[in-house]
Image (spheres, rainbow, N blue to C red):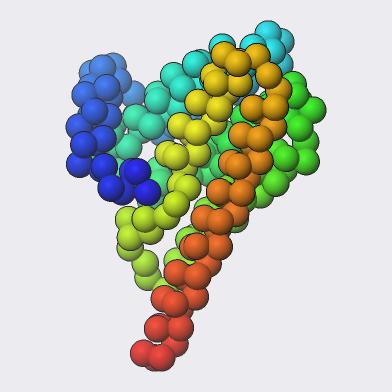
Amino acid sequence: MLDGLAKKYIDPIWERMAAPLVRAGLSPNQVTLIGLGLILLVSAAYLLHESALVFGLTLAFAFAFDALDGAVARQRGMSTKFGGYLDAMVDRYQELVVLAAIAWVNDLWALSLFAFSGAIITSYAKARTAIEITIDNTAWPDLFERLERIIYLCAMLVVSALFSTGWILIIGLAIYALLCHLTAIQRMMRAANMLKTGDSDS
């Protein structure tokens, strides 16, 4: 939702941040894969240092870098269907790695599974609709999209560390999971209306 509503304000920021990567000659797909590598690195480091504060801050940096692939693609004129597909698949693996790291360090496997399943179903709800009918990829202003999930996760980790209590992480992850599934249901309802309209027009 934030990405859609504030796109005209956010995109110029990404464009400026991506400029050094463009000058370095990196391709969008290389930026995507480097972003995945950074997420893997900071998540693996979290398993060792177990500091939610460090994880939250380094995760924010890694996710910010990962978000630059689209800006690099636009500036270099290298937007491709494969690039969009690769980015979407890498995004899912990034969320899996981050939530698995949180589950491992804090023994929150059930909550992390509930959270990840909500994020995956949210993504699948739009992707599956696109198989049935042509859709506008930007016309899905949903409650808890990926940008909101990233910001929430990083903030949740930092806040839990500042207050030095595991309850914030447990409650925060439960809210995260609930918001993911509410968004999945929101998308399912929108998709149902779109598909019914398509059926009646055919």
Rendering coords of residue 187 (x, y %): 49, 63
Residue at x 69% of width, y 32% of height: 170
Report the residue at 74% width, 21% height from top.
105
x, y percent for residue 79: 30, 43
Residue at 61% x, 34% y is 172
Say above or below: 91 vs 124.
Answer: above
**Foreground residue among 155 and 134:** 155
Q: Quadrant of the C terminus?
A: bottom left
Question: Where on the picture, by quarter, is residue 46?
Answer: top right
Q: Which is more toward the observer, 16 or 104?
A: 104
Relative placement, left or right, of 8 versus 159 is left
**Residue 50: percent from the left, percent from the top?**
69, 13
Q: Is residue 131 left or right of residue 170?
A: left
Task: Tell me which corner region of the image, top left, top right, bottom left or bottom right, holds residue 200.
Answer: bottom left
- Of all residues, the one furthest to the top in this rendering is 49
Q: Residue at x 42, y 39 (%)?
A: 147
Q: Visible in this render: residue 22?
A: no
- Answer above or below: position of 168 versus 190: above
Q: 71 above or below 22?
A: below
User: Residue 189, percent across and down?
Assistant: 50, 70
The image shows a total of numbered marks equal to 0
Give the side of residue 48 with respect to residue 190, left or right.
Answer: right
Locate residue 122: give its quadrant. bottom right
The answer to whether residue 172 shows anywhere in this view is: yes
